[in-house]
Amino acid sequence: MQKKITFMGAGSTVFARNVLGDVMCTPALQDSTIALYDIDEQRLNESLTIIRTLNHNVNQDRARIEAYLGVDERKEALRGATFVVNAIQVGGYEPCTVIDFEIPKKYGVRQTIADTLGIGGIMRGLRTIPVMEEFARDMEEVCPNALFLNYTNPMAILTGYMNRYTKIRTVGLCHSVQVCSERLLKALGMEDKLEGRKELIAGINHMAWLLTIQDAEGNDLYPEIKKRAKEKNQTEKHTDMVRYDYIDKLGYYCTESSEHNAEYNPFYIKSRYPEMIEEFNIPLDEYPRRCIRQIERWKELSKTLTEDPNLTHERSREYASYIMEAVVTNKPYAIGGNVLNTGHLISDFPEQACVEVPCLVDGMGIHPSYVGALPPVLAAMNMTNINCQLLTIEAARTRSKDDILRAIMLEPHTAAELSISDMKKMMDELIEAHGEYMAMYH
């Protein structure tokens, strides 16, 4: 079959290199047409140079590489696509990420990452959905059967919106499911249990739960995990203290990092208990620091990557190429994917929720697995986030500030810190500061 892979946000050069490098390492995909799309000419050209080099060195120039710049060329970039990979960031670090951190800080709301939940996640979702809606309308016209692989956060909000309000088949993909149990076992000195382990992970993106973990013989590893995690939290400062506290208080580990999970609940970042920041080693303002580091490093890294004639690549663990391969070859592959909770895959949640569950991929697409009920405390933790996600999606649908305020009111961390009147003031200030990115909300 003819295969075309369109990469939206191709100026995310390192990520584009990983995903498209993986494509070139996959025999069933090596003769694809690869369309790079971005609105930043310089970053698009840097990615084009790198992808062409990889195509030559890794793929013997078998792929056809195209580049498309700006909204006027977007439809052509998408025309006839088999797969569309989405890695956009609307508004970038400046101005939007800075605004999402600095204005809430004035109101006493401190954040760590602010891309998934929290006031920052809500704002990011609301300014990204109108852009993705435009993608979907173009796709409905020029590639209606394409599979949309969404990597952009807030994952559950964006993937939920696409699956509910567009005709485009969408699956949300994250990096955290693949590495969850491996990193946990290594950090606790249980590397000997890695080989042949069996696990079940389900919940929502960034807060999916390691429900079951067994060694190769089927022995439950959780009793030893709980013992070692509690001891580690009591005896040393480390970077995963919030999730280890989850193990202690909730009984289970979750997929995404402690710096993320510190802000998905009302428990750890609390103005009345400032000592908890140090107690749980919580890196406030972590994402802006990362952005600044990446921007500084990119000048040097881009030179290295674009000027290296011997640039090469080995297939990574990112799901994208494996999904494409399974669809093209009809050989099933298992992933952890973000999909609608249709048929109550997780029976505790509404069908409109976007859940992260085991999925089988084959020539017919994505087939999510039924999980059933979660332990009650885990379902309750997830629902506090799902409530906010569903209300944010509703606000994106109605373009109503009243609905935005309702989403903010149900956001666990913000609600624990602010009065409703301060939430409204903060919301109004954020929308005004975001300017054209949120001009559609009234």
Image (cartoon, rainbow, N blue to C red):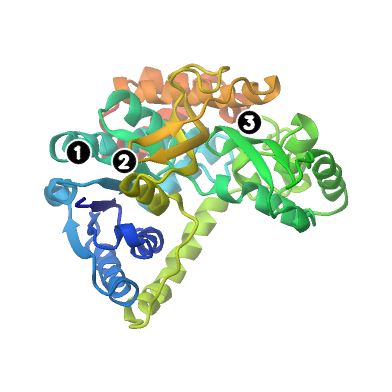
Of residues 286 and 350, which is closer to you in this image? 350
Do callouts 2 and 3 mark residues in contact (Cβ within 8 Å)? no
Real-space Cα distance between discs 1 and 2?
9 Å
**Which circle marks residue 416 in the picture?**
none
Q: Is residue 411 left or right of residue 156?
A: right
Q: Residues within 10 Å of mark 2 (few under 14, many from 20)?
A: many
Residue visible at 33% across and 83% down?
309
Task: Name which residue type carries label 1.
Answer: Met
The vertical placement of 233 against 167, above or below, is below
**Which is nearer the eye, 255 or 268?**
255
19 shown above or below 305: above
Tag 1 residue: 139
Q: Is residue 430 visible?
A: no
- Name the quadrant containing residue 123: top left
* Residue to which mark 3 is pinned: 265
SS category of the residue bearing label 3:
loop
Q: Are marks 1 and 2 in contact (CB under 8 Å)?
A: yes
1 or 3: mark nearer the eye: 1
Residue at image x 66%, y 26%?
Answer: 378
**Residue hosting label 2:** 148
In the image: residue 313, left or right of residue 30: right
At which x and y percent is residue 147? 30, 40
Q: Mark 1 near mark 3, Cβ–Cβ under 8 Å?
A: no
Q: Could you say whether the residue bearing mark 1 is in a helix, strand or loop?
A: helix
